[in-house]
Amino acid sequence: MRQGARAAAALGATAALATSYLLWEAQAVRRVDRRLPAPGCPPDLDGLTVVQLSDFHAGFRPSLNARATRKAVDLALAAEPDIVLITGDFASGPGGRAELLAQLRRLRPPLGVYAVLGNHDRGDSKAPFVRATDPSDLEACGVRVLSNECASVTRGAGVIQVCGVDDASGGHTDLPCVVESLDRRPGVLRLLLSHQADVVLETAPGDFALILAGDTHGGQICLPLPGRRLLLSDLSARFAEGAYEPEGRLLYVTRGVGTSMLPFRAFCRPEIVVFRVETGAASRA
């Protein structure tokens, strides 16, 4: 009986430590730095700092998403971005929105904050108690929500065109409308925001210098198998996390900030991504 009690105590302690670690990792937001080669763009765009945020999932319960969001915004501000791009899933539940909006108001980069909606923002999710996000709430915080449209900003002689497609899983995407709106003048830095990454396959090489996506959470809970990681959030994801270059089209899929369904992360820390534009670079991102 004593041996059984000791074994049970050891198992309980191990489970408690494992749970503590999973909860810690869910809020251990990291910063990822990437280069964004933009040969042919004006020198005024050299050194442009672009920050990508995604998948806050505010209001999901239980979770540490509010704390992770504050840390993500702190890291974003420390990067001194020129522009901030958010790739969807702002909210998941009925609570936590006031805190999310307060954090969004802290983002005041000189070239603005641009975003697209994700499936949770459209109320489309397997998670219970999901509430759709009101774009007007985001706009009131200074976030320009792009729904199958483009917006252009300038930095000196440089032009940045930020385009966004709406949530693809709910059939809200209209990529042809976006492509028709592209500013194809030489030297224009064109960026595409999409919650889901598969939209990259519907673009043509040269349409965009970079396509940004989220949605997968990088797996959220991953199993480190020999030679690879098994991503449990979406076992069939073609573009799970990180940088890809399918047929010459640059794509980055972020792990995002928050969690969904479970308040845990394993071997998959949340992240913000900081891109530095290099107008004279010939290397890949």
Image: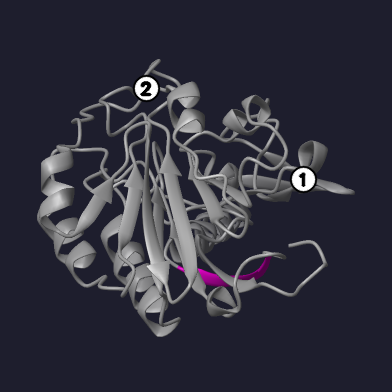
On-image quarter of the C terminus = bottom right
Residue drawn at the location 53% of the way across and 71% of the way down: 30
The span shown in magenta is: 28-37
Residue drawn at the location 49% of the way across and 26% of the way down: 175
Residue 96 visible (yes or no): no
- Does 201 appear in magenta? no
Q: Locate residue 77 relative to residue 179 in the image: left or right.
A: left
Question: In the rendered view, would you say 76 is above or below 112?
Answer: below
Q: Which mark is residue 245?
A: 1
Q: Position of residue 41 (x, y in %)?
A: 63, 66
Most foreground residue, 169 or 5: 169
Q: Residues within 10 Å of mark 1 (few under 14, many from 20)?
A: some
Question: In the rendered view, would you say 109 is above or below 12?
Answer: below
Distance from the alpha carbon under mark 1 to that under mark 2: 30 Å
Main SS class of the magenta portion in the image: strand
Please give the residue where the numbered disc 2 appears in the rendered image.
126
Query: Of the residues shown, which amino acid type is indicated by label 2?
Result: Lys
Please, what secondary structure does the residue beneath circle 1 have?
loop
Residue drawn at the location 72% of the way across and 65% of the way down: 39
